[in-house]
Image (cartoon, helix red, strand yellow):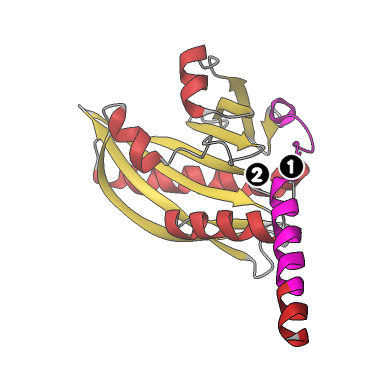
Amino acid sequence: MTRRVIALFACLMVSAGVIARADRPEIVPLRQPLQRVPLKIGDWSGNNDAPFSKDVLAVLGVDDYLTRIYRNPRGEGVGLYVGYYESQRQGDTMHSPQNCLPGAGWEPVSNRLIDLAAPARIAAGGRIAVNRYVIQKGLDRQLVLYWYQAHGRVVASEYWGKFYLIADAFRLNRTDGAIVRVTAPVGSEPQNESDAETRAIGFIEGLLPLLPDYLPG
């Protein structure tokens, strides 16, 4: 009987600790506001895009975001969007482009994962996987590369992103995270898709080393 009482007491203590940890307010601000991301990244020069409307922000639920157009010396452009969530406990979760883009009239043409080189600050193994989508609306086509970034981890998979969200909520009492999306217009010629990918990857190579200065590790 004494052993059962001790075991029950231990279970109650552990449960109380877990509940207390889960109920503890999480405050995980950015290291710096996203607007401080440089307008000059390597050879790319950026301009802020039009800010989102209040209705769009209400749907997104982001705590901070960045939307810009960057151009290289040849005038070729890429779009950058970074959305950051301090907490995803109250229903403000990241919106997957897989859901948002079709809702905006864009239809997926192809999708797969691609492997990119990454600095040690981003990935200890020096490589990350990101989502690669080609989308189309009317005659317009775009290449979209995106990933989720949180707690020193880059994840492409929607499912693994949800798994880590739950695991880190218990392990670290943190549900903060960011989505990073880079888009590049695709022309009508077959080689244009490859050119757009090369352009987007070239921009990402300059962007990746900067992100840890803004996103919490």
Classify 10 Å Cα crowding around label 2: few (below 14), some (14-19), many (20 and above): many
* Dot in front, 1 or 2: 1
**How far across and how far down the image is residue 11, in percent?**
71, 71
- Looking at the rendered structure, the secondary structure element under dot 1 is loop
Main SS type for the magenta part?
helix
Q: Amino acid at mark 1?
A: Glu
Looking at the image, residue 141 lies above or below residue 156: above
Looking at the image, residue 147 lies above or below residue 185: below
Query: Over which residues does the magenta segment extend?
Result: 9-37
Residue depicted at x 74% and y 53%:
21
- Looking at the rendered structure, the secondary structure element under dot 2 is loop
Q: Where is residue 72, by image quadrant?
A: top right
- Return the mark for residue 26: 1
Q: CA distance from mark 1 to mark 2?
A: 9 Å
For the image, the number of numbered tags is 2
Read off the residue under disc 2.
176
Q: Is residue 196 visible?
A: yes
